[in-house]
Image: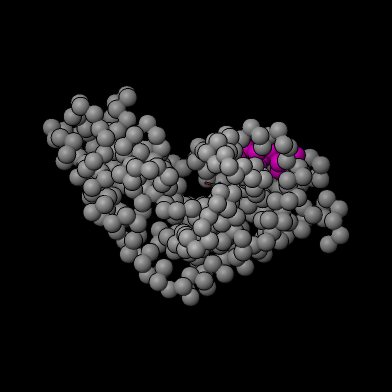
Amino acid sequence: MEENTKKTVLSCIQPSGALTLGNYLGALKNWVAMQEEFDCTFAVADLHAITVRQDPQKFRAQIYSTCALLLALGLDPEKSTLFIQSHVKSHAELMWILSCYTQFGELSRMTQFKDKSAKHADNVNLGLFAYPTLMAADILLYKPDFVPVGADQKQHLEIARDIAIRFNNIYGDVFKVPEPYIPKVGARVMSLQEPTKKMSKSDENVNSWIAILDKPEDIMRKFKRAVTDSEARVCVGEGRDGINNLIGIYSAVTGKTADEIALEFEGKGYGDFKIAVGEAVVEELRPIRERYDTFISDKKQLEDIYKQGAERAFYTARKTASKAMKKVGFVL
Ligand code: TRP
């Protein structure tokens, strides 16, 4: 059967606030493409999101919204398994088991933990500390060949691999040790206002980031205000972070190379270029927004999709969790 010969992929995304153009060009656009080549499992990581405080009502709305957006982007429940992490109980279950095979010292070294505990100094909770162990459970339950992760999650994938190897060394071949997946194309999208920083939805300056669901006029305004430099030449150059970022975005959306872009805008000013980038992004995101509106307004359909996804996910997850528990010596 064709399905059995495909390599498998697992990834998750947190439902915490608006997803940005950075999430889209850096990760989600690749998820959509990967569905053709791989047998993919994608989850909305709601359990991870409560490591920082969430307003219950907003949180619930964001979980729905993230599901609808993933569908709008083109993730296809016929091709991939899509579900909400907390619906598959094996994640929390295996996480406990794995936490007994994760060392305090190695979790203390995680840079994201250090950053987040500095940022949320009044709430450095156990969940925040154990976050990578939950992520290891997410991954190892599905025995994926590949896990697409951005630079900020590489350390967490490393620890998942270490935990898998450690567990396998004691109990035999229980978990598959996954490889990181580095996409062929992908853009690291930077802030439009401070282009040395990654584009982030937590940035207070709303002009620095584009949400996937932003209105066309907002997208245009943000690109028109994007920070550039005084050279007034559209071409990639060392230290030209603003213009490099805009070229990167334009290239990721249009498929044109940096050289082709330089040629296209030779003799033209930044004003024209910014408008072209804005328009290209507006056109790329327009159909996504339209599809989002149809998915989010049909709760019943959304529910059918994520429930079916959870059932399918649980089938695989349960087997792995049971095997691990049996090896440890639990009575099943
Ligand atoms: N921690 C990831 C992030 O914030 C999300 C995530 C949770 C994840 N579980 C995962 C990513 C498993 C890959 C695999 O981006």
Q: Residue furthest front?
A: 122
x, y percentage for residue 15? 50, 55
Name the image quarter holding residue 294: bottom left
Q: Does the stretch in magenta take in 324?
A: no
Q: Is 158 displayed left or right of 75 in the figure?
A: right
Residue 154 screen position, x and y as percent: 56, 38
Seen in the picture, residue 74 relative to 273 is either above or below; the reply is: below
Q: Residue 227's spot in the image, x, y percent?
A: 26, 35
Q: Is residue 156 magenta?
A: yes
Q: Is residue 80 visible?
A: no
Q: Is residue 103 above or below residue 50?
A: above
Residue ID at (38%, 43%): 204
Image quarter where the N terminus lies is: bottom right
Which residue range is magenta in the image? 154-166
In the rendering, at what x and y percent does residue 183 appear?
46, 42
At horizontal 34% and vertical 42% (from top left) the residue drawn is 205
199 lies left or right of 78 = left
Q: Is residue 221 left or right of residue 118?
A: left
